[in-house]
Amino acid sequence: MYEPIRTKSVHTPAADAGFPHRTREEELDIQLAGHLSALLAVTDELGLGATGDRIAAQVARLRGTPPARHAGRTDAPVAALHRRAHDLAGRVLVVAASRADTAVAILAAEAMDAHTAALAAPQSATTLVGAH
């Protein structure tokens, strides 16, 4: 009465689909490295070498290769850079918490605190963030 289906359903994933699959942990590593790299760029723009070195070490650990570093400061307003760095550190903290990376979570929390303090006292912004 009914003719049998001769082709596979397009809704059934093939076991060997021909493209690589990543685990959730691999995806989180990629996302975390990306957020850390963005934070590193802003940190370098602020001229915070010691903090930048700590962030670069974590990026290198996640990616297996050292990140590219920013050449130096830009003409962007310092307060805007601190707000951007604070936002990026918050994103890093969320991803680090979801992948249970304590070292990066601590680094991100310290960065958030330092950038918040720098925004509260703009005259000593560089010294507050560079202290970590």
Image: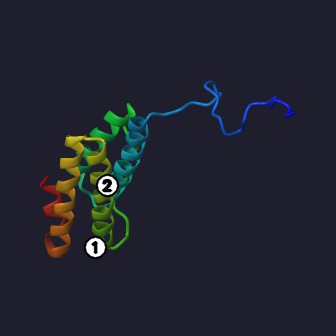
Residue marked by disc 1: 79
State the residue lying farthest toward the front: 1
Callouts 2 and 1 close, C-beta under 8 Å: no
Residue 82: image quadrant is bottom left
**Residue in view at x 82 percent, y 28 percent:** 6
Q: Quadrant of residue 8?
A: top right
Residue shown at the point (12%, 55%) measured from the top left: 131
Disc 1 secondary structure class: helix
Residue 128 in percent (x, y) is at 13, 62
Mark 2 → mark 1, Cα distance in angstroms: 14 Å
| Spot occupied by residue 5 in the image (x, y as percentages of width and height) | 80, 31
Residue 81 placement: quadrant: bottom left
Question: Which residue is situated farthest in the top direction here?
Answer: 16
The residue carrying mark 2 is: 44
| Residue 93, percent from left and from top | 27, 53
Q: Is residue 129 above or below residue 18?
A: below
Q: Nearer the viewer, mark 2 or mark 1?
A: 1
The local crowd at label 2, few if under 14, some if 14 to 19, many if 20 or more residues have their Cα within 10 Å, is: many
Q: Is residue 1 above or below residue 82?
A: above
Tell me the SS state at disc 2.
helix
Q: Amino acid at mark 1?
A: Ala
Please report whichever mark, 2 or 1, sits nearer to the chain's N-terminal start: 2
- Within 10 Å of disc 1 (Cα), the crowding (few <14, some 14-19, many 20+) is some
Q: Give the amino acid type for the residue marked by disc 2 in the picture.
A: Asp
